[in-house]
Image (tube, rainbow, N blue to C red):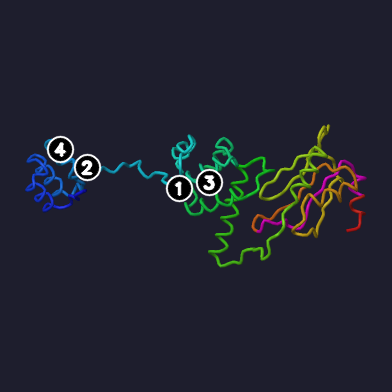
Amino acid sequence: KTHKVSSVRSVLELSQRRRISGLRFFVLLSLLVRGLLVCAVTSREMAEGNGELVEEMTNPKMGEGAGDGERTEDYTKLLEYGLDKKVAGKLDDIYKTGKLAHSELDERALDALKEFPVDGALNVLGQFLESNLEHVSNKSAYLCGVMKTYRQKSRATQQGLPTPAITVQAKGPDEDKIKAILERTGYTLDVTTGQRKYGGPPPNWEGGTPGNGCEVFCGKIPKDMYEDELIPLFEKCGKIWDLRLMMDPMTGTNRGYAFVTFTSRDAACNAVREPA
């Protein structure tokens, strides 16, 4: 049984029952009058010896990160950097998934997170966690891109401007087909919030970027079309140096156009002559 000692009257009652000694009575009374202490006294401990007083002190570290499980060593680094405790906890949770390592974040990304409102930072990190990062080579820059998009959407909402929205969930690229293309060609695919870049340069390429007349602009691309469908079409025209499909971070779909650079002018001319 536990007695809550939260008033002078309760101290007097315990003293009369000889639950606490005379010295402890005056100490408790002094602290209570000064409004400094609310403590718990157990009958069992009061009955032993001269009566022991159990005071429950609040540990400033208790509850920190409660419910989040064990923290990694990087959690402390994030706090020392100045990140909010909730933001640091969310980022540490992402670290534990293996989708991101602390070493992959540069100062630019950490500074941006530190300056972000807590709710906004948590929202951004949630979006980052749900993103497909398989072909993202610079995750720090990608996170900065997600934050930039979040700011743009928030600013548009505050100004009462309509924000682009997808009424029907757009289909993403066929990852199995993309993987097969990359394995067949040896090209790389680098994804950012603004574009999806295939190649540039091709494997074993010697020399610089192809000169004038080798790049082709391709418009009127369906918003749900990706490299898995575009690359086979352009490969018919000649050897691709790189293909850059421009993305709209506000909607998550492509912008409807791409730039394709071929290794030769003849291939570029073939692409221009190719019927849509």
Q: Which mark is residue 48?
A: 4
Q: Which mark is residue 55?
A: 2
Q: Give the percent coordinates (x, y) of residue 174.
A: 75, 51
Nearer the observer, 214 or 249 = 249
Amino acid type, callout 4:
Glu
The reply to whether the magenta stretch includes residue 106 is: no
Q: Give the percent coordinates (x, y) of residue 97.
A: 57, 42
Query: Which quadrant of the figure has residue 263?
Result: top right
**Label 4 near label 3: C-beta < 8 Å?**
no
Few, some or many residues within 10 Å of mark 3 (<14, 14–19, 20+): some
Comes first in the chain, label 3 or label 4: 4
* Closer to viewer: mark 1 or mark 2: 2
Comes first in the chain, label 1 or label 2: 2
Q: Give the percent coordinates (x, y) of residue 88.
A: 48, 43
The reply to whether the magenta stretch includes residue 254 is: yes
Q: Residues in magenta?
A: 251-269
Residue to which mark 3 is pinned = 112
**Label 3 near label 1: C-beta < 8 Å?**
no
Q: Which mark is residue 86?
A: 1
